[in-house]
Amino acid sequence: MAHGECRSGGSLEERRAEASLADADTAGQLKMAGAFQLYQQAVGELRLAQVPQVQAAFSRAGPFSAWLVIWLMIYQRLHAKGTLSVAVGELLTGAAGSFVHRSGGVASTPLSANTSAYSQARSRLPVEVAEKVSDWIFEALNDRPRILPGLGRPMFLLDGSTILLAHSDDLVAHYPPPCNQHGASHWPVIRIVVAHEVVGGLSVRPVWGPIGGTAAVSEQGLAKIIIGRLPADCGVTGDRNFGVFSMAWHATEQAHPCLFRLTDLRATKLNHGSLPRAGSDRQIRWDPSRQDLRNNPEISAGSFVAGRLLAFRTHEAGGKRQKLYFFTTLTPPPQQILELYGYRWNIETDLRSLKREVRLHALKAQSADMVAKELVLGVAAYNLTRAAMNTAATALNLNPRQLSFSRAQDMLNAFLPVFAKATSEEQCQSIMQQMLTAFSQSKLPNRRRRRSAPREIWPRPCSFPRRKAGEKGLP
């Protein structure tokens, strides 16, 4: 829809949003011109070229630099189709084409639509470089962390999930498929732990490991690593799976105040054999058990964590009453602690965005190195979209969580080629205002309570027969 059409029509809320933009004159000052512009600001081409691993891997002259390869891999994650040919098409028609190294410096040399050169460049890219760029993007976009009222510090949400991988010899060796009483699965699976900022949703670089085999890792083991990646002077919160002594100890050792929900059994042990009374809030000293010390050799026998044990009686979405127990080293009043834990639902929607919108639910890479690169750069693509949403929300005086991630991603992809064709600052400002208007119309609906889908599965019809294992002696 054209900007003039939005101004003459639309709802009262939309017209007010446009008027506020014109009055505040934010369109000309805002430096949000899509994911590519944010990538250029966060990752300098010369800075990346000076990294030793980049110089070693891309020493031979070729059309692709490490900086361009990383952007194209991010672009694949932002695109709905996400194939190699889509990335090469971006070179032919998009703003990234001007960054191709032409042979002999001849700008008129036509680019090939073949994907082989790009595929080889992706393979040459070191995993360490992809991880470094992902960290640079997060640090650049998180330069001004958002702080919840009354806390005085940003908070990060911990959660774990699984990702399905392709079946290849290399992936099966690195990530053995999980087993049950019926045998081993065909598909390798990895366990992943993420940490997302509560308000803006930005994610630090995730950690993962095998879910099966002798080197299988737990969510708590992965969380120890990701806690060390959190920015300084921030807090961390998690559900009952992270409400164990080792998590509280590691967070405290690294100066991260924590809030973890406890199971009924663990709350009973911390309360000397009985469940805490609803409404209670008392100071406790959490000492490690023998199992804690056995499973975490880095913790000494005399270690402890001082904090608070809180109990609340609340109602679920369906009206059912439940009791919640927490351990925290934070100091705000009890009701504010309960409200803070209520933000934990944001990590569920963030994981959904990572899996559905950035397509990290199942990776098609055939090697462990390519899986690592796809993961960290997929999170970088997610962060670029989140940063654009946060900037737009600030200009529109909205909470970033009020914007739809999928719609915001669609708007970025739609306006990216328009920005590439802009020839003046006035055109950029006009396009920016149109994009912010589109963002203002990408709000999520206000629901009184979360929708809960019934736990029923209706299988989708399929015209192909299901795979059946052949009998012995038969192909």
Image: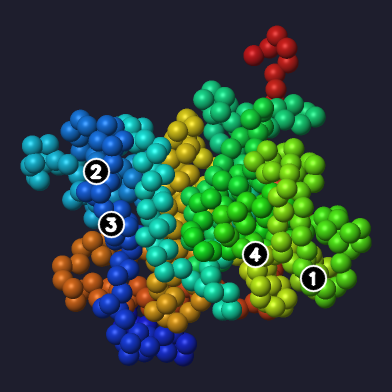
Give the residue number, with chain letter if any, for mark 4. Answer: 344
Label 1 to label 3: alpha-carbon separation: 50 Å
Q: Mark 1 vs mark 3: give the one in front.
A: 1
Tell whether 144 sits left or right of 295.
left
> Residue at point 69% right, 41% down?
296
Of the residues shown, which amino acid type is indicated by label 2? Ala
Q: Is residue 178 above or below residue 76?
A: above
Quarter of the figure that contains the N terminus: bottom left
> Residue 139's quadrant in the figure?
bottom left
Q: Mark 1 vs mark 4: give the one in front.
A: 1
User: Are dots 1 and 4 in contact, CB under 8 Å?
Assistant: no
Find residue 40 and name its label: 3
Find residue 49 and name its label: 2
Q: Is mark 4 on a helix, strand or loop?
A: loop
In percent of width and height, residue 350 lies at 56, 59
Label 4 to label 2: alpha-carbon separation: 39 Å
Of the residues shown, which amino acid type is indicated by label 4? Arg
Task: Please report whichever mark, 2 or 1, sits nearer to the chain's N-terminal start.
Answer: 2
Task: Please report whichever mark, 4 or 2, sits nearer to the chain's N-terminal start.
Answer: 2
Tell whether 145 sits left or right of 261.
left
In percent of width and height, residue 325 lies at 79, 65
Label 1 to label 4: alpha-carbon separation: 23 Å
